[in-house]
């Protein structure tokens, strides 16, 4: 590899948590780079179909009100896939973002195979002596402007970090910058059946609960876990239904 890759899409997500199987995407940001220069950006908030936890609101600054009118992932995803089509992906801890995107793509019926470059992996190789290799720390270390935990800002920061790493380390360690195939095995989630959704609504009414998810958008496994959680916390359905004060679950 005689020169670093100059054409790629830098991507970052904000999510409700760290587990692709259980958590949801709430923001996608992407920066298209061609010949080393920013050629375009793409960004979308995403309605996760559930209320955000306080920790997520505090970390990202995103709120339920901001996401209420946002598209669901099935609506947002096609635009993102078109934006990055044919490009190598770049990101900081790229496997994390790709695992969420791959699951969303599979569930929506899309194939999403790509190669990638991970700036976290490069930083661990070349900057092992630093106190930290988080994106925020590295941006501060190199003087890169950065507003953390918003997807487009993090994608821009990862692009600038990559350029910094290329300038410092590519001449001697060019092979470390080669794109690698991104791998993530995902099975398509089945949507919740009508009987499951009706049971959840009945459990909520019987126990006086206000569900913090959009029942219509639950998968079969999500609906099953939620029903089990209600029964574990509140017990079996009482003989006489109680209409309570809207506890969240």
Image: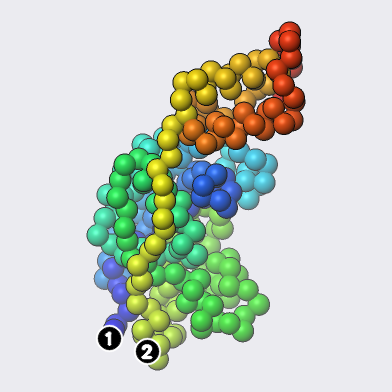
Choose between 147 and 64: the one closer to the eye.
Answer: 64
Where does residue 156 sit, x and y in percent of width and height?
A: 44, 62
Q: What residue is rendered at 34% in x and 77% in y?
A: 178
Q: Is residue 217 visible?
A: no
| Pointer 2 residue | 171
Taking the image as shown, residue 33 lies to the left or right of residue 165, namely left
* In contact (CB < 8 Å): disc 2 and disc 1: no
Where does residue 195 sit, x and y in percent of width and height?
A: 50, 20
Where does residue 64 sit, x and y in percent of width and height?
A: 57, 34
Residue 201 is tagged as: none
- Helix, strand or loop at label 1? It is loop
| Pointer 1 residue | 2
Choose between 67 and 211: the one closer to the eye.
Answer: 211
Where does residue 143 sit, x and y in percent of width and height?
A: 54, 73
Q: What residue is rendered at 36% in x and 36% in y?
A: 75
Q: Is residue 131 above or below residue 42?
A: below
* Colour option used: rainbow
Q: Is residue 232 above or below residue 195?
A: below
Q: What residue is rendered at 43% in x and 86% in y?
A: 169
- Seen from this angle, which residue lies furthest top? 240
Q: Callout 2: 10 Å neighbours few (<14), some, many (20+)?
A: few
Number of numbered discs on residues: 2
Q: What residue is rendered at 44% in x and 32% in y?
A: 191
- Seen from this angle, which residue lies furthest bottom? 172
Q: Callout 1: 10 Å neighbours few (<14), some, many (20+)?
A: few
Taking the image as shown, residue 201 lies to the left or right of residue 183, namely right
Mark 2 vs mark 1, CA separation in Å: 9 Å
Q: Earlier in the sequence, mark 2 or mark 1?
A: 1
Taking the image as shown, residue 64 lies to the left or right of residue 105, namely right
- Helix, strand or loop at label 2? It is helix
């Amino acid at each position: 590899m005689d020169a670093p890759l100059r054409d790629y899409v830098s991507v970052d997500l904000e999510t409700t948590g760290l587990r692709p199987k259980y958590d949801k995407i709430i923001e996608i940001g992407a920066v298209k780079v061609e010949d080393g220069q920013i050629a375009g950006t793409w960004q979308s908030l995403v309605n996760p179909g559930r209320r955000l936890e306080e920790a997520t609101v505090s970390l990202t600054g995103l709120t339920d009100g901001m996401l209420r009118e946002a598209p669901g992932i099935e609506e947002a995803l096609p635009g993102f896939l078109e934006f990055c089509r044919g490009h190598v992906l770049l990101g900081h801890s790229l496997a994390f973002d790709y695992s969420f995107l791959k699951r969303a793509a599979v569930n929506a019926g899309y194939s999403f195979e790509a190669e990638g470059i991970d700036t976290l992996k490069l930083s661990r190789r070349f900057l092992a002596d630093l106190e930290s290799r988080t994106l925020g720390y590295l941006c501060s270390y190199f003087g890169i402007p950065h507003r953390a935990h918003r997807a487009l800002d993090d994608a821009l920061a990862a692009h600038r970090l990559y350029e910094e790493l290329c300038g410092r380390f590519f001449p001697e360690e060019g092979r470390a910058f080669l794109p690698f195939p991104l791998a993530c095995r995902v099975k398509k989630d089945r949507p919740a059946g009508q009987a499951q959704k009706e049971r959840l609504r009945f459990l909520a009414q019987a126990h006086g609960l206000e569900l913090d998810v959009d029942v219509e958008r639950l998968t079969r496994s999500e609906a099953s876990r939620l029903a089990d959680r209600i029964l574990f916390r509140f017990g079996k359905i009482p003989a006489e239904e109680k209409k309570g004060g809207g506890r969240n679950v």
